Amino acid sequence: MLRFLVRRVLFGILVLWVVTVVVFAIFFLAPHDPARLIAGRMATPATVAAVRHNLGLDRPVYVQYGSFVWNLLHGNLGYSYYRAQPVTQLLLSRLPVTASLALGAAVLWLLIGVGIGVLAAVRPRSLEDRAATVFALTFYSMPPFLLGLVLLYLLFFRLHLAGVTFFAGGGYTPLTQDPLGWAQHLLLPWITLALVTSVTYIRLTRGSMLDVLGEDYIRTARSKGLGELRVIVVHALRSALAPVVTQFGVDLATLLGGAIVTEQVFGLPGLGQLSVQSVTNQDLPVIIGTVILFAFFIVVANILVDVLYAVLDPRVRLS
């Protein structure tokens, strides 16, 4: 298991190194003046020259790249001249919002997706199975921004007119400041992401469970007199979770990189909103920082997925 984990970590480090090369080439070697972009559109020639010198853009390319990687290894993602703030500090201030949104929605979509998927697989072609199909098709065809606006209208606007003020329409309250307010402000975004994302998990779980329930060892477990609940949860579901784990790692890492649409709809000051603002303002250091952070989340998520694979199926460790 240790050798398996070491191989995956080394491969992840290699992927991150390739990402740094690509990012450096795109933003620093492309035919434009990165100092002008980083300094901002309103910068004076003196400011542009100072930025060029501070970034080492007047030095050889290999020295620039070495300095770029060295800063990354020390957690220095650059400096946003537009916001007059270090990029690392800026990203860390926005990360709790996006992490709260992603983790809360992930719990909901796993409960909904896996639960409905198992129920549909255990009773194929039943009323429950058909209801799961209708549920999946409904939310699969609904964009997140549209569902978010519908929930805002029904559960925030209409209920507020009726005197029910439980749901919040937007904004964010830190967990350490007010746990109840934190949950209230994130409840509608959680539901929006969970309903849209759970559709994939319903289909994956149902298909995988149907394949597993037809295996010989499931029939053997039933013939030994094991309870149906134990057969489904302990024996079948564990084997059926492999595709679910893969999808979960990708989805969670993507959301941690910034749930752009949902954060914009509900006014959440997270990484997604920061990314949109940075592209609009041509804030190059923040764009670079979010790309690197997003790649880091993807690599870590894939390593964790591989580890979960090895736990669910020990044969993976030998591959």
Image (spheres, helix red, strand yellow):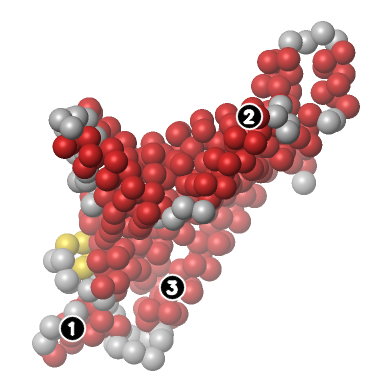
Mark 3 / mark 1, whichever is N-terminal: 3
Q: In the figure, 295 relative to 194: above or below?
A: below
Decide: few, some or many residues near mark 1? Use Cα within 10 Å; few <14, some 14-19, many ≥20. few
- What element does badge 2 sit on? helix
- For residue 95, say whether it is visible: no
Mark 2 / mark 3, whichever is N-terminal: 3
What amino acid type should be assigned to the residue bearing mark 2? Glu
Residue at horizontal 83%, vertical 31%?
A: 214
Residue at horizontal 88%, vertical 27%?
A: 216
Res. 153 mark: none
How far is disc 2 from disc 1 in space, using C-alphas?
A: 58 Å
What amino acid type should be assigned to the residue bearing mark 1? Arg
Labels 2 & 1 near each other (Cβ < 8 A): no
Left or right of 307: which side holds 291? left
Mark 2 / mark 1, whichever is N-terminal: 1
Q: Quadrant of the N terminus?
A: top right
Please name the residue that numbered disc 1 is placed on. 41
What amino acid type should be assigned to the residue bearing mark 3? Val
Q: Residue 229: horizontal and vertical position, in percent?
A: 68, 15
Please name the residue that numbered disc 2 is placed on. 128
Q: Nearer the viewer, residue 259 or 30?
A: 259
Q: In the figure, 302 relative to 156: above or below?
A: below
Residue at horizontal 31%, vertical 36%?
A: 187
Residue 161, by quadrant, is top left
Of circles 2 and 1, the one toward us is: 2
Please name the residue that numbered disc 3 is placed on. 23
Q: Residue 45: horizontal and vertical position, in percent?
A: 13, 90
Residue 10, by quadrant, is bottom right
